Amino acid sequence: MKTKQRDVTREKLLQAAFCEIHRQGFQAASITNILGDTGLTKGALYHHFPTKQAIGLAVIEEVIEARLDELIFRPLRESEKPVETLLEIMGSVHRKVGADFIKLGCPLNNLMQEMSPLDEIFKARLNHVLAIWRQAVEDALLRGIRQGQIRADVDFRAAALFIVSAWEGCIGIAKNLQCPDMFGLCMSQLQVYVRGLMRTA
Amino acid sequence: MKTKQRDVTREKLLQAAFCEIHRQGFQAASITNILGDTGLTKGALYHHFPTKQAIGLAVIEEVIEARLDELIFRPLRESEKPVETLLEIMGSVHRKVGADFIKLGCPLNNLMQEMSPLDEIFKARLNHVLAIWRQAVEDALLRGIRQGQIRADVDFRAAALFIVSAWEGCIGIAKNLQCPDMFGLCMSQLQVYVRGLMRTA
DNA sequence: CGAATTACATACCGACCGGTATGTATGTGT
DNA sequence: ACACATACATACCGGTCGGTATGTAATTCG
């Protein structure tokens, strides 16, 4: 079972790359810095990944998407009260992720803002993750309509797009204000929006 | 009046720097590229600006803030029906700015996302512009309350913060989807939120 | 008109970047 | 046990970066 060592090294590189990219952005992320954190060298990195771009794409798929899935997508899909769950997640994410994530912002959105206009392949992979997010929210709203919690006349497609957009917007602004309280204040208004989509009790 | 030539050169450098930064981000913006657009050389640039950072800061104050003021802040301040004006601006901005601005995103937000965690001085200047924006929206909402268009129980401070956040979020997502229609769809839901703050007619 | 300052242009520097060529242990299948 | 591939480490390359030292027209001023 020594074949596991390969995966251990690869995972160590991916995690270090994720941290460096999260802190510096992709273009400013230095391969030397990534390796410095791990104790490995360029020989190891370029054995596992052909280019720097490939590292970035692997980080998106294997780290960022996985974390978002665990934090948001899966809870939303598996919930039997999706609207409640959506509101609950909105209010609790900042406690589940570390303080880094408010200071450094959403890794997905950071990469989208930086790389999408510059690199089509990045754009495609990033938009794929974004599409999953949108779909998860859209399904939650749709089930909310069927369960009678959300008004039937709501444009759930537009609403899902807006919810994800505003969500990322709140994270981005909080990142600049460097203030968790502002993030909570901002997200509370997103909850107000969602409650506005619900049937008046 | 030959002292004007200095300002012409400086302005030419600022505009070229703004374009390059808008396209590539600040860190990836190449001074050589900026100069290539203008026909000038490093001698000129470093005569007017001591460092690359100084160029970035000048772009924020003299280009970005000025454009936002013309496009959003001033119309909002000078309007006698601020809530209507706010809704109108939300629906029309994407037509007033070029198509570049949907493909490349909001110059202010781009810089905030990239530079705020890395440079305190950038963060301060960027947050100053952001504060003006928030204040303009907050004042609009407050006047809306006094004029009876907005419900008196609305937390106008939180609402203003959210409106700006969601606004930037919509621009950012539309930039990744590379789709003006999606921007319109997204902003329409922000208008829905704002109308939710208004008194039911 | 001559001196001094301003407004640039040119040439060059060290630092760092992503990437590669090569060397070397460590398994691994037969 | 031997041939061979795997999994790294080391040394180095060309290119680009921001920044600077120096040179030179143009302008201003006494």
Image (cartoon, coloured by chain):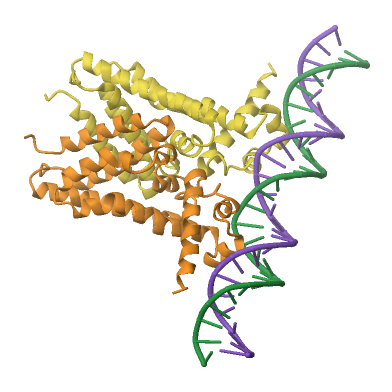
Chain colours: A orange, B yellow, C green, D purple
Which residue is at 29% across, 29% downward? A185
Which residue is at 29% across, 54% downward? A132
Q: Position of residue A13 (x, y in %)?
A: 50, 58
B43 or A24: nearer the viewer: A24
A182 or A157: nearer the viewer: A182
**For this view, does B139 lie left or right of residue D11?**
left
Q: Position of residue B198 (x, y in %)?
A: 18, 24
Q: Position of residue B201 (x, y in %)?
A: 11, 24
B66 or A111: nearer the viewer: A111
| In the image, residue D7 above or below residue B182 | below
Which residue is at 19% across, 52% downward? A139
Which residue is at 7% across, 45% downward? A148
Residue B102 makes an appearance in the image = yes
**For this view, does B31 lie left or right of residue B161?**
right
Residue B81 makes an appearance in the image = no
Locate the C terminus of chain A by quadrant.
Answer: top left
Locate the N terminus of chain A by quadrant.
Answer: bottom left
Q: Position of residue B116 (x, y in %)?
A: 49, 34
**Rendering quarter of residue A161:** top left
| In the image, residue A84 above or below residue A129 | above
